[in-house]
Image: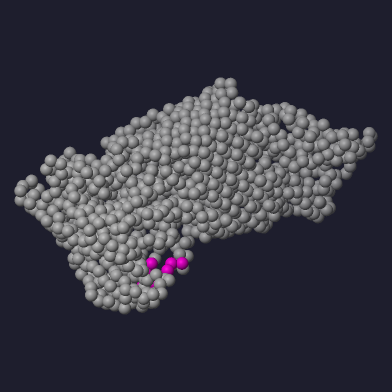
Amino acid sequence: MKALLKYGGLLLALGASACVDVEDQPSKVHDFRVLGISLEKPELMAPTCERTPEALDVLAAEVTYRALLVDPAGEGRPIHYTLWACADTEDSRCSDEANRVMLAEGTATAGELSLAIRPGAATVGEDSLLLERVQETDPYKGLGGIRMPLVLHAVAGDEEVYAQKLMVFWCPVVEGMTENVQPVIPGVLLDDAPWAEDALPELSGKGPFVVTSEDVSALEETYVVPGLRLDAVTLTEAWEISWHATFGEFSPQVTGGADLGGQKGKHRTEWEPPEDATEAREVTFWAVVRDGRGGSSWVSRRARWSP
Amino acid sequence: MSPNVKARSALAAASLLLAAPALAQAPQAGTDTAQPEAAAPAQAQPTITKPPELVQQVEAQYPPDALAQGLTASVRLIITIAEDGTVSDVQPTEPVGNGFDEAAIAAVRQFRFSPAEVDGVPAPVQVEYVYHFTLNAPPPAEGAEVEEPEAPKATLTGQLISRGSRSRVAGATVRCGDDPEAPEAVSDAEGRFTLQVPPGECAVRVVASGYQLYQTKEQLKPNETTEVNFYLAPSGGALETVVRSERPKKEVVRRTITRQEAQKTPGTFGDPIRVIQALPGVARAPFTSGELLVRGSNPGQTATMMDGVRIPILFHLLGGPSVVNAEFIDQLDFYPGGYGSQYGRAVGGIVEVGTRKGAADTLHGSVKVDVMDAGFFLESPITDGISVAAAARRSYIDTLLPAFLPKDEGSTLSIVPRYWDYQLRVDFGAKRGASSEEEAQAQAGGARSSGYVMAFGSDDQLRVVSSGPKTERDIDLNTHTNFHRLKGDWTYRKGALTSVFTPYVGLDNSSFEFGTARQDGRQYSVGAREVLGMELSSMLSLRTGLDLVYEYESYDVEFPAPEDFEYVSFPGAESVGEMVKERISLDSFDGALFLEADVKVGKFTFTPGVRGNLHLVGDTQNVALDPRLWVRYAATARTSLKGSLGLYSQAPETFRYVIAPYGTPDLVYQRAFQSSLGVEHRFTDVLDVDVTGFFNRRFKNVVEPGQIVQRESGGFYQERYSNDGIGRAYGIELMVKKNRASAQDKWSGWLSYTLSRALDGRAGPRPERNGGFGGGFSDEDAPTYGLSIWDQTHILTLVGSYVLGNGWELGGRFRYTTGRPTTPLNHTYDLYESDRNGYRPTYGSLYSSRTDGFHQLDVRVDKSWQFQSWTLTAYLDVQNLYNASNAEFVFNDYRYRTEYEIPGIPLLPVVGVKGSF
């Protein structure tokens, strides 16, 4: 009942906030942002939970770090970046110098930033593995996996973003644990028609235009994690897709996921151009998928809209 | 003109008036025998256990000029009788002039009464008194006596009924014409009268206190009986209730809301609990929420009880109308702090809802309809000494809502909210004609029992279904909660001993279905309270008793394994866990033994008390001892200084003790220290002022979540709750209240102002995680203790009501409060968390900013039409008349760059209709 009261209050507040018109929305990409970060592999799983050379080798493997940088108003300006790994997930900027390691730095432009990194091999202090510092800092001591924060500090002009992504290191704590598979959107439909990556469909009028993802339910993994009582807990992914566009707005802006009753949302959204728009233009769309356990990827589409 | 002058007066059957402190019956008139002021049917507590009796009467001087002119008059007076029986004040209700007022007041000031008692304690009371100045007929000339043959007589008999409400009018005088020597009859308790007069035309005049003069003509035939019903028009509105007597204030601060105020305070939709928010010491709750935030305490820390039994759920549908039907209440007592040892289970304030006793005269009732629900109230005597009152209400928004929901092809949306509640009370042991408690006891053989049985309950259902190919998410939510309480009240009085025993049983059900998640809960409770009062001497009285509650709760739950309870969560899209099924049951006992005494030493009254509390849940055993002390110094008859200090305890709710990680089985009593110091002064009989300062400190309060703990057997859990909560509040409260002096007094209202500061937070370290169901902190760097989110430096409320006449009444409420504390944003860069696709805020100092001050004017207009035997009332209640844009909360854009204010309720008119008989 108390939980009900709490959620009731939350609903009331949400309902009230719905009455306020907020101009800046997540799906409206108009300035410099990081829309998503992906690691390939999304997690590294050691063959054993003992500290063996083989296990450390697996955890120290190279992974590909990808960040989706968008800067529609930047006109190709340089984006300076630094990538840090640190020990505390609450350290949003990796500001603790004693417990951080710089993995990369440089300059890029808007688009996909791709870096090869080995965070599992990073050391701090007198040759201590950063992984161990992460585990020490974790109140659950790694029972939910060792989650190393990777923080990208990106600066474009006077806009500055710290973007954190958790790199997950596992070992088979309980039986049945398997390595996470990167979630991938199988395809996108525009008004129920396939929308290919290289296509430029014509959209006309005020819409709304229905955008959906092809069915992902078969791709959502059922997996096992250690429970807080050290038992095995079986979970099923409920992917979320966030939708973004350089023009207009999506509603809803995030699809999928599951509520507390386990009911999954559908990946169906509607895109509408601004009500006062009068000029035809090309619009870029992104859909970023997250599997809720560290896996993420994205797709991009284009269309030409006219009033 | 005959020089024989007779100035007659009489004190009415004062017991009728005085025995009903809040419950004036239909007003009555005085003639030969003075009649007391009205007393409406109402509650039994507190009771005037001993009415005042006139022990010294002084005859008034007939004004010479009036005498010379042969004028007569009746002067109606309100007499305030002090605790010692002396007359402390006399005010005419309607001056009649010609020197009659002055003569009557001068005489009455010299009257002396036996002290009245309320609940066995001497108390000041008010009575209405009518002083009649009449002229005797000249004596017959000497030797002129002749035997007259017996003349034929006509009989006029009938009943006097209050127009619009059908209340019987007792104590009214019925006579033919204006001749002071004409025969007259006084109506009895049933309003019946029989008058024998010479046949012919009778110019009937009916005089009754609180009613307009009634005049009509009847043709009476010799030796025949004419039976009539006269409908008297109340002078202050058919439903006017005049509260004359007053309970002695034992507590440092007790604020009382009458039924009239509860129903007609603008902006509250006639909701009695929401009216409490207009009193000092209560912070304004957001939107139209009725949450009681008393002297810096948090929601849930103020206990609301109906005749001593805690109401488990105060509002329908989480924040809708309160489950307390305003028709069923007699009055509300609000104790913001410093209350006596009889009360416990709260570290904030106490709200005591006094229910309404069924009418003793005849069947009455009302039907009310507004935009949300419709309900009825009925009250009636059943047989001698037994009466019943019943009320019920049901919403019908479930039938109206579909018309307003969006209809979209390809999707189905159904929202079905539904609620109902009921109250039933059967009283027995009424005094059956006795004019005083002593007389009643004498009739009953030296001791008397009275009491009642009451049942109340509430039921809420909400079903939300959203589905279809066009919907983003299929939703199927079904909740159903209800509770029922059955309580008894047995009051036994014998001499100086009073015993009140109130047992109760309760049943609570709750079910919740959302997707695959399901929870069914059931709670059985049984409790009892025994209060034994003994007046050992005029200087010492004792009260002691027990207050026991036993609860058994069981839950049958089935839900997907929740993160941070069963496994460590990962930021972002929550996976769907395997189903967890649990059957949990636990029981608890919370008992208290209390003792307090009133010790009078001169002008001081000391009330030391102590309450010992014992709480048993599973293997947990908690003990708390709460010593308390009040001191009252009666500086003058009109001015008192008062102070209090003490400890207060509140056991956490039983469900919080379920096994970890879903509960915390080793919680202890929540505690508070409360103190206050104040002064109250009665400027006039209708104008009171009270200024009270307070300092409260709360500790060991329950907060959520607790710390992450490593299990001995391996693994972890996060304590669901902890007793780390602390808080502090201090301030000063002002209450200026103007009551109606009489039915003719048009103004009433109050001014309430609070200047305060409230702090809240937790002791000990911050938990490393925020727990599974939220709570905790949004800003990791914020201090764990600081300004309370409910802090409002200034809280001003003005409530006024004006009787325009002709059935019209206008009321207004204006509120101003300091804006809600907010934590300002301090954005210089974005902090993006890719896994949960969200941003993290960068805040300034905790609650270092505020929203703009809140101000709002609410207005209510009532119009009554009185018909022969019923009254129709329509009302328009307009919230936020000038449509002020008040910020209730602040939220941010998704990147925490800009703050937006969530506006409160805009201009909102609500209409309703009520018929009563």
Q: Is residue B428 visible?
A: no
The quarter of the picture where the N terminus of chain B appears is top right
Q: In the displayed structure, would residue B829 be above or below residue B655?
A: below
**Residue depicted at x 52% and y 30%:** B677
Q: Is residue B788 magenta?
A: no
Q: Residue furthest top?
A: B601
**Residue depicted at x 36% and y 69%:** A248
Most foreground residue, A200 or B739: A200
Q: In the displayed structure, would residue A42 be above or below residue B123?
A: below
Bounds of the magenta segment: B404-413
In the image, B507: left or right of A155? right
**Residue depicted at x 57% and y 49%:** B814
Q: Is residue B410 magenta?
A: yes
Q: In the displayed structure, would residue B871 be above or below residue A87?
A: below
Quarter of the figure with residue B595: top left
Q: Main secondary structure of the magenta part?
A: loop
Q: Is residue B203 visible?
A: yes
Give the x, y percent position of residue A139.
Answer: 22, 43
In the image, A188: left or right of B713? right
Give the x, y percent position of residue B717.
Answer: 23, 44
In the image, A15: left or right of B693? left
**Residue depicted at x 42% and y 35%:** B728
